[in-house]
Amino acid sequence: MAGMGVLARVLRSVGGDEVLDRLAGLPGSDLTSLLLALARRRAGALSATDVLRQYRSDRFVAPSPVPFAVLRAAEDRLLAALPSSFSVLALAPVAPLGTCSAVAEMDQNNIVSTMRGTEVAADPTNALALEAALLRQSGPDDVRLAAVQRVVRAQLFSGAGRFAHFSLFAAVSAGRARGSLDFELEHFAEHIAFLRSACGDVEFRVTVLDPRFEAVRGDLPADPSRRTGYYKGLCFKVFRDGVEIGDGGFVDWTARLTGNRKERLLISGVGVDRFATL
């Protein structure tokens, strides 16, 4: 609500709500040209000491407090345990505008939008879903993809191990529904086995959102208290030493991206920084 108050004040100072409407209605290339000119003018007014002052105080630009060698060791451990059926991608640091808000229904205010019609990477599972959707349109086989990516989140976090930018390991499995939840059973078991192999002595807590998915959950502990509109059918969290390090579940992203309701997608992710500090 405070953000809306600031926006209202700014709009009043520049001519009212219609200014925002007119800017939002500009063609993408025109808006990009305007924003680039604005950024160039503002950057031109900065001195080197101004840049250092921002570097000192801006949470988005400070180096990670987790030592690089510790992070790298955690990344290597996760990648080494990944089944050979997964293809590991080096994702771009930006994604199309709306990758998170339009596909995964996240608030765009939690994403760092850019001036060129893109957004700074906030979650590699979303980018992997885009690639999986493309691959699924050109072939009948299941697609397995993974990546490690440094991401940025704009919302404020509190507590230890919560940073403005951090590394995420992500894995996705995409394919067509086969009936009897065969796709879901196969790929959920594969993700769980991988996470156990990579992360050691971990605890899974599974939330069944559709009674049919009880068979997919198997003998893993249930977590009926969790409520989410993000996942479909089933989701889970991963804990090590009582600390949440991972999350995953089934989503409808590739079905929406391809326009095919038969498409299925399972995603899982591990917070590398948090895992590394353990």
Image (cartoon, rainbow, N blue to C red):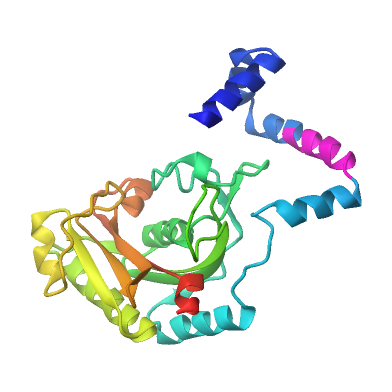
**206 in relation to 75, above or below:** above
Asked whether, in this view, residue 15 is left or right of residue 139, the answer is: right
Q: Main secondary structure of the magenta part?
A: helix
Asked whether, in this view, residue 259 is left or right of residue 146, the answer is: left
Q: At 66% across and 22% down in the image, what residue appears?
A: 10
Q: Position of residue 9 (x, y in %)?
A: 63, 20
Asked whether, in this view, residue 226 is left or right of residue 153, the answer is: left
Q: Is residue 146 magenta?
A: no
Q: Position of residue 261 (x, y in %)?
A: 25, 49
Q: Position of residue 193 (x, y in %)?
A: 28, 81
Work out whether residue 25 or residue 214 is closer to the camera in this orientation and state it.
214
Instruction: Examine the rendering and report whether any part of residue 187 can be seen.
Output: no
Q: At 42% across and 62% down in the image, what residue appears?
A: 135
Work out whether residue 49 or residue 40 is closer to the camera in this orientation and state it.
49
Residue found farthest to the front: 159
Q: Quadrant of residue 138?
A: bottom left
Q: How many marks?
A: 0
Q: Position of residue 200 (x, y in %)?
A: 34, 85
Work out whether residue 212 or residue 202 is closer to the camera in this orientation and state it.
202
Q: At 48% across and 48% down in the image, what residue appears?
A: 99
Instruction: Examine the rendering and report whether any part of residue 144 can be seen.
Output: yes
Q: Is residue 44 magenta?
A: yes
Work out whether residue 243 or residue 133 is closer to the camera in this orientation and state it.
243
Q: Quadrant of residue 136?
A: bottom left
Question: Start and end of the magenta stretch?
Answer: 35-46
Q: Which image quadrant: the C terminus?
A: bottom left
**54 in relation to 108, above or below:** below
